Image (tube, helix red, strand yellow):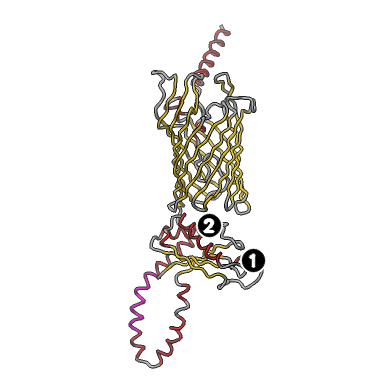
Amino acid sequence: MKLNKIVLFSSIILLFISNLYADFALDGNRFKTSPFSDGFLTVYGSEGLEEGLLGVDFILNFQHEPLTVSGGNKVIKNQLASDISISYSVVKWFDLGISLPVIFFENGDSWNKKDSLAAAGVGDLRLVPRFQLFSLFDKHLSMSVITEVTAPTGREIHSALGSNQFTFRPAIALGTQSKWIDAALNLFYHVLPKQTFASSKFDDEFGLKLALNVHAIENLLDVNAEFHAATSIESPFKNDAQDNIEIGGGVRVKTPANIDVMAGAFGGFGDAAGVPQFRIYAGISWNMNVLPPKEEGEKTVKKLQKKQDEKPAEQPKQEEKKPEKKEKKAAPKKKAPVKSAAPQPTEKTGEKLPNVVNFLHESDYIQNPVEIEKVALILTKNFMLKIRIEAHTDKHENKVYAQKRANAVKALLIKNGVEAKRIQTKTFGSSEPVSTGDTEPDMVKNRRVEFFIVTD
């Protein structure tokens, strides 16, 4: 009797497990695009985002023969899906992304009326927190830890829309940034329960993703390429169902309205389950800093607003005093030096902001855009204000670099949402040094761009 009970109990457990994995469904990462706006599509960058930066991505993805389910008999041949992602940088070293695939259309073979293929639905929800460990040499070398978790939300609608379990994919992301080229390398470990599908064993896998992003036209056009590879932990490079390679790339066009437009294609190699023969993507990405300006910026704005309010009241008083002073003979003589000094301040009209951008010798490359972004925040919050960019060089540089620096700063302000008509530029070359020394620190101080609020 005891033996029969044990056999019966074991049979029930085995039946439960077999039903749990009867409809084999690949995890939602197969539909993954990045919830971060790093210039890459599926490879995570490692640089920390600016605090308060909010990003929204919408990417359409068409895949041919992306996955096979249920014993190899039922096949999905074509699928049109979108990846809707939202990311927010809580602090400079931590950001959080949430991404949800939405399937608009799919078709395939061997599906019957009782278990028909879902024409549309929602895939597996992904939560992607990213922690930056370090960033050195002005982002030339940085490292982050990314812990991606996928929830089986798609399976609640249909077995072909997502995974049948939670998945966990920790990754180490290495990244580098420069004026013309960015690169990222992801090393990941994918935790999966052991499963058997079409005579192939599925277990945990590890892999890498490599991305290269070239700024073909600065602040306008990026060209990127990616390489993805993964293999099974249990039988590395021997499990055809899990070993996969995917290569692709595309372009990203940047606009002044903080909206990027992207398009490209990928091709899959090998017989790995879930890797499409090819896929084509297109989408848009928007990002903006939603935090108010820092206290320093707010104080500057308040001062400017006060001055603008006081100006109309001061002008009539000066006009009333002028005729009274004209009756005295000594008054015109005292006013003469004041008039002669008037043309000099016109070169520096307006409130000078504390933000300064410095440059390398004979270069217009912006190493740290933080100060420019602070100015952009002030201007986007106060739409009536205009800015004047004043660019300088050191005495050993060609004055043409002053104009190049002014143009580079202006382009970045426009990218951060400031209208071009609100920006003026003025160049001085080396005529107004702030330091008279000949050392490199002195020269760095002179190679600068300053900002003035236009009040006239």
Residue 370 badge: 2
Identify whether 214 is placed above or below 306: above
Relative depth, front residue between 452 and 430: 430
**Of the pair 295 and 140, the residue shown nearer to us:** 140
Outermost top residue: 1
Residue 428 x, y percent position in the rendering:
53, 70
Name the amino acid type tagged 2.
Answer: Val
Query: What's the amino acid at mark 1?
Result: Pro
Quarter of the image containing the C terminus? Answer: bottom left
Residue 360 within the magenta-colored segment of the rendering:
no
* Residue at 58% over, 32% down: 245
Q: From which residue to which does the magenta span run?
A: 307-321
Residue 255 rendering spot, x and y as whole percentages: 45, 51
* For residue 356, above or below residue 83: below
Nearer to me, 433 or 126: 433
State which tag comes first along the sequence, 2 or 1. 2
Q: How many labels, in total? A: 2
Quick check: is 317 in the magenta stretch? yes
- Horizontal side, residue 268 vs residue 350: left or right: right
Q: How far apart in space, not on screen, are marks 2 and 1 (Cα)?
A: 20 Å
Whether residues under marks 2 and 1 lie with C-beta atoms below 8 angstroms apart, the answer is no
Residue 37, x across and y down, in percent: 50, 45
Disc number at residue 441? 1
Circle 2: element type: helix
Neighbor class of circle 1 (other Cα within 10 Å; few <14, some 14-19, many 20+) is few
